[in-house]
Amino acid sequence: MLTKDRILSRDVTATQIPSGDKQALPAGTTVMIHQTLGGSFTVQTDFGLFRIDGRDGDALGEEVADHAVKTSPLAGGAPDPAAVWEQLRKVFDPEIPVNIVDLGLVYSMDVEAKDGGHQVNVAMTLTAPGCGMGPAIAEDAKSKILLVPGVSLADVRITWEPPWNQSMISEEGKMKLGLI
């Protein structure tokens, strides 16, 4: 496990784990970095766990992640579905070192024209119904989807049907988890 004590050099807005709520962490807060995956940092403070976006890496003394999505919208301004899937591959459960796509948690993704723009709708699940990470993971997915050119709205919904099982993990995900 990666653990590094740091002191925030400036205020940052972080996502509280597991609620997914946004919260300001002030400069001078001591944090312990537990994980760096998908361009974000999972940190522990004296008052809970948080996910700090990679664009705020400088506040931790880390390299700032480049979140720019290097693609253009399709004809009519619609987002490129491949770019949306690539963004979803940057989303991780803070407790599992495999992205949500390779874990088999994303059941569907579609793009629809809505309100003069384009909305991306994602249906996903979690590894267990009692997993409290759902709101934090859904918020992370939504924020990454909104970075795709042509996306004006994103809706990420948690579903329990069909129930997730390990056979849904991709071969790459199984390799990372040591299952094959």
Image (cartoon, helix red, strand yellow):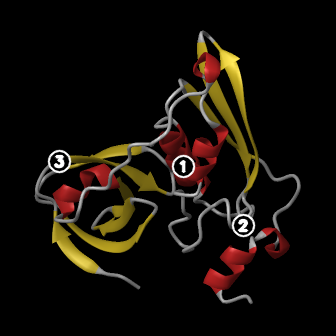
Mark 1: secondary structure: helix
Q: Is residue 138 left or right of residue 159?
A: left
Measure the alpha-carbon separation of dots 1 and 3: 26 Å
In contact (CB < 8 Å): disc 2 and disc 3: no
Quadrant assignment, res 125: bottom right
Q: Quadrant location of the N terminus? A: bottom left
Which residue is found at the position 64% from the left and 60% from the top?
100
> Would you name the residue on which mark 2 appears?
127
Q: Position of residue 171 (x, y in %)?
A: 74, 76
Determine the CA span between mark 2 and mark 3: 33 Å
Callout 3: SS: loop
Name the residue located 67 percent from the left edge and 84 percent from the top edge: 175
Q: Which residue is mark 1?
A: 87
Q: Is residue 170 above or below residue 175?
A: above
Q: Residues within 10 Å of mark 3 (few under 14, many from 20)?
A: some
Amino acid type assigned to the residue bearing label 1 in the image: Gln
Where is residue 172 shown, x and y percent of the image? Answer: 68, 75
Work out whether 87 lies above or below 47: above
Q: Earlier in the sequence, mark 2 or mark 3?
A: 3
> Residue placed farthest to the right in the image?
162
Q: Amino acid at mark 2?
A: Thr
Residue at the spot of label 3: 11
Q: Nearer the viewer, mark 1 or mark 3?
A: 1
**Three-letter amino acid code of the residue under disc 3:** Asp
Q: Is residue 179 above or below residue 77?
A: below
Mark 1 touching mark 3, by CB under 8 A? no
Residue 41 drawn at (x, y percent): 36, 63
Q: Quadrant of residue 6?
A: bottom left
Q: Secondary structure at mark 2?
A: loop
Q: Is residue 58 left or right of residue 107?
A: left
Counting residues from the N terminus, which is met first, the one under dot 1 or under dot 3? 3
**Residue at 74 percent of width and 63 percent of height:** 104
